[in-house]
């Protein structure tokens, strides 16, 4: 007899002290089952405020880890422990090497304030926390960098070079990328020094895509996520986090055409006739798409059966320092 996953998930959610969390990039059928949705910042905040002892997080690894870091008393399970490709680009060793690069170019460690995008491993957040730094998300990076600059130090921004450069540009700051091909990065001459990480999904959007839509519909608006390349953000009408993109589109006149540069599942959900995907290919995040309704069901069932699967653990030393960086961010918001 086949299982009705939807009905079973609804039953398990009713009977267990559990909250199901889903990021916007999840498949529709999984996203519809979530009690808490939002961009990375909202998910972190809402999970911290939630009272259930169990969290089942449908998203990518750093998101579940972040809940465990800020609310260690919670039992956090992930239907798929899928890792964000950008977060995988940096670890504690690469972080140390980035600091060493700045040291080698005349910037002392005590003159560096590290900021890590929330799309990073707990070990990187811990390094940042230990050095007095902060976490940021795509929705609060401006505020966090602004706060960081009050220290009078140079900002080391990891791991996303695009987010770091985009916010530096919007604030009129000088930035450079360590190890960027064909370009010199002199930390002594820049305010924001970025690690060379990126999101392969958001690199799919090109200036040709924007040109195509602008030629086809001269009045069209272009809205993109700040993980896109700085040239794309420059050419767009709006850049913002997933929640900010949704708000921007919802506030447009329904007749206004808009092409959106972010993950496919979210853009597809926003479609109302005048909304387009800013790409000739399907910009899907492979890891976000790994989680299925069956995975969600099995994870909830494992709680009922007292044999929890895919539980997230963070060792106490790492958690302590990573939490400092996350709490500094939450305090600013
Ligand atoms: P948001 O915080 O904007 O939801 O972004 C998360 C993400 O991974 C974007 O690729
Ligand atoms: Fe990571 Fe990019 Fe997927 Fe976002 S879209 S989770 S940054 S790989």
Image (cartoon, helix red, strand yellow):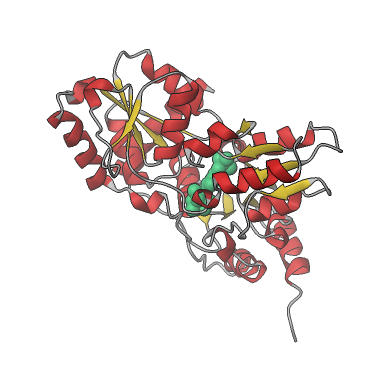
Q: Is residue 280 above or below residue 120?
A: below
Q: Does residue 14 appear left or right of residue 171 in this picture?
A: right
Where residue 293 sits: x, y (%)? 67, 67
Where residue 244 sits: x, y (%)? 65, 34
**Residue farthest to the front?**
215
Identify which residue, 67 or 60, lies in the foreground. Answer: 60
Where residue 212 sits: x, y (%)? 66, 47
- Quarter of the image where ligand 1 sits: top right
Callout count: 0
Quarter location, residue 233: top right
Q: Does residue 148 appear left or right of residue 226 in this picture?
A: left
If the image is split into quadrants, where does the N terminus sit? bottom right
Q: In the image, what residue occupies the spot 33% across and 43% down?
A: 196
Q: Is residue 301 above or below residue 144?
A: below
Identify which residue, 269 or 81, lies in the foreground. Answer: 269
Q: Does residue 322 appear left or right of residue 48 in this picture?
A: left
Is residue 326 in sight in this rendering? no
**Residue farthest to the right?**
255
Q: In the image, what residue occupies the spot 19% across and 26% down?
A: 109
Identify which residue, 96 or 195, lies in the foreground. Answer: 195
Q: In the image, what residue occupies the spot 52% across and 53% down?
A: 201
Q: Is residue 326 above or below residue 119?
A: above
Q: In the image, what residue occupies the spot 45% across and 25% down?
A: 169
If the image is split into quadrants, where does the C terminus sit? top right
Is residue 169 in sight in this rendering? yes
């Amino acid at each position: 007899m086949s299982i009705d996953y939807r009905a079973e998930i609804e039953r398990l959610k009713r009977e267990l002290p559990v909250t199901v969390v889903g990021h916007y990039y999840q498949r529709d059928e999984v996203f519809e089952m979530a009690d808490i949705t939002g961009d990375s910042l909202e998910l972190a905040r809402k999970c911290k405020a939630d009272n259930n002892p169990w969290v089942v997080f449908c998203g990518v690894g750093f998101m579940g880890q972040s809940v465990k870091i800020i609310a260690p008393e919670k039992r956090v399970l992930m239907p798929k422990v899928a890792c964000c490709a950008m977060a995988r680009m940096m670890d504690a060793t690469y972080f140390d090497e980035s600091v060493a690069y700045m040291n080698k170019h005349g910037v002392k460690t005590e003159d560096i304030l590290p900021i890590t995008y929330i799309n990073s491993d707990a070990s990187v957040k811990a390094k940042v926390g230990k050095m007095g730094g902060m976490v940021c998300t795509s929705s609060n990076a401006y505020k966090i960098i602004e706060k960081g600059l009050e220290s009078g130090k140079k900002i080391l921004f990891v791991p996303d070079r695009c987010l770091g450069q985009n916010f530096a540009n919007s604030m009129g700051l000088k930035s450079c990328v360590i190890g960027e091909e064909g370009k010199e990065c002199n930390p002594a001459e820049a305010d924001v020094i970025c690690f060379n990480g990126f999101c392969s999904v958001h690199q799919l959007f090109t200036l040709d895509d924007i040109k195509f839509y602008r030629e086809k519909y001269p009045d069209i608006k272009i809205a993109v996520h700040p993980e896109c390349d700085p040239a794309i953000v420059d050419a767009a009408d709006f850049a913002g986090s997933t929640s900010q993109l949704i708000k921007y589109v919802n506030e447009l006149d329904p007749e206004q055409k808009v092409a959106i540069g972010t993950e496919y599942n979210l853009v597809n959900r926003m479609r109302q006739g005048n909304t387009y995907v800013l790409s000739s290919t399907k910009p899907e995040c492979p890891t976000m798409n790994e989680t299925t309704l069956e995975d969600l069901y099995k994870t909830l069932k494992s709680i009922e059966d007292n044999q929890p699967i895919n539980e997230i653990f963070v060792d106490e030393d790492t958690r302590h320092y990573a939490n400092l960086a996350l709490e500094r961010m939450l305090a600013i918001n």
